[in-house]
Image (spheres, grey):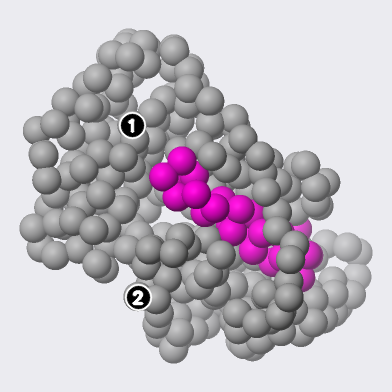
Amino acid sequence: MEVLRTVEELRGWSRSRRRAKDGGAQRIGLAPTMGALHAGHVSLIRAARAACTDVAVSIFVNPTQFGPHEDFARYPRSFEADCTLAEAEGVDVVFAPAVEEMYPAGAATFVEVEGLSDRLDGASRPGHFRGVATVVAKLFVAAEPDLAFFGQKDAAQVAVVKRMTADMRLATEIVVCPIVRDVDGLALSSRNAYLSGEERRQALTLNRAVRRVEELVAAGERRACALIAQAGAIFAAEPEVRLNYVVLVDWATLEPVEIAVAGTLFAVAAWVGSTRLIDNTILS
Ligand code: PAF
């Protein structure tokens, strides 16, 4: 496995892999990450490994998607362990650029997906999705992947990235991988490392709300107001957990819906202590 540090090296690798085989059967896969790899990331890598001939994983804690008072400085970083894991999973290339490589001095170009970027997480994290769309666009331009793999846990991010890719007519197909959970249901996140024992217990409130809504929908309830009220009641019973949003939205537009249909996104975000967590389900 190679570790590449520059955009030029990544582009060179991608183009040489594309030329390396005959018949055009090669497929370049990219799993963009911020490192601190866990089983959720491994699921992206495995999906990429299964669908692609060549797999790159990017590890870059992207400063532009963090607000000034957010956790950029303390975001977990475990580069050596990440590389060991990536290599064991058959990754061909880890792309780990410095901040100056992705944002050269004087860089003034950003990608903004208007509308979508202000909804869900974008509403309480201004500028977050501008940073995500910008860095993902840069990664796509550098790696020129056929397929890029994202986790459903970041459902609003998926909507933003899909829209950005479609609007910019990029040739990369977005593959969404299911949420990976701990045995007790907590959605895996690098930020779970911040939780104390008691906060870890409180964090299960998000998954309880998700499961309750799934049960209600399975029992025939489709009204957004009823589903949101029931989810809200679960948060009300755990007052230490501060609800940020509980929504039923169209997954492509992130606009609220009144009636849940197949494919509607139910999503929650809440602070547990100082840690902001998210969870969701795509209703069937
Ligand atoms: O989901 C993440 O880890 C990040 O938002 C991403 C897509 C790697 C962009 O920095």
In the rendered image, residue 131 lying in the magenta stretch gets the answer yes
Predominant secondary structure in magenta? helix
Pinpoint residue 17: horizontal percent, then vertical percent.
Answer: 81, 76
Q: Amino acid at mark 2?
A: Arg
Residue underneath mark 1: 246
Q: Which of the two discs, 1 and 2, labels the residue nearer the N terminus?
A: 2
Question: Looking at the picture, does residue 157 appear above or below residue 131?
Answer: above
**Quarter location, residue 207:** top left
Above-or-below relation of 111 to 227: below
Q: Circle 1 sits in a helix, a strand or a loop, which is it? A: strand
Task: Check disc 2 and report the residue beneath it.
Answer: 74
Which residue lies at the image location 38% right of the left edge and 63% below the top edge? 70
* Mark 2 residue crowding within 10 angstroms, few (<14) / some (14–19) / many (20+): few
Front-lying residue, 60 or 13 = 60
Q: Which residues are magenta?
A: 121-147
Q: What's the residue at 33%, 31% (across, down)?
A: 246
Res 198 quadrant in image? bottom left
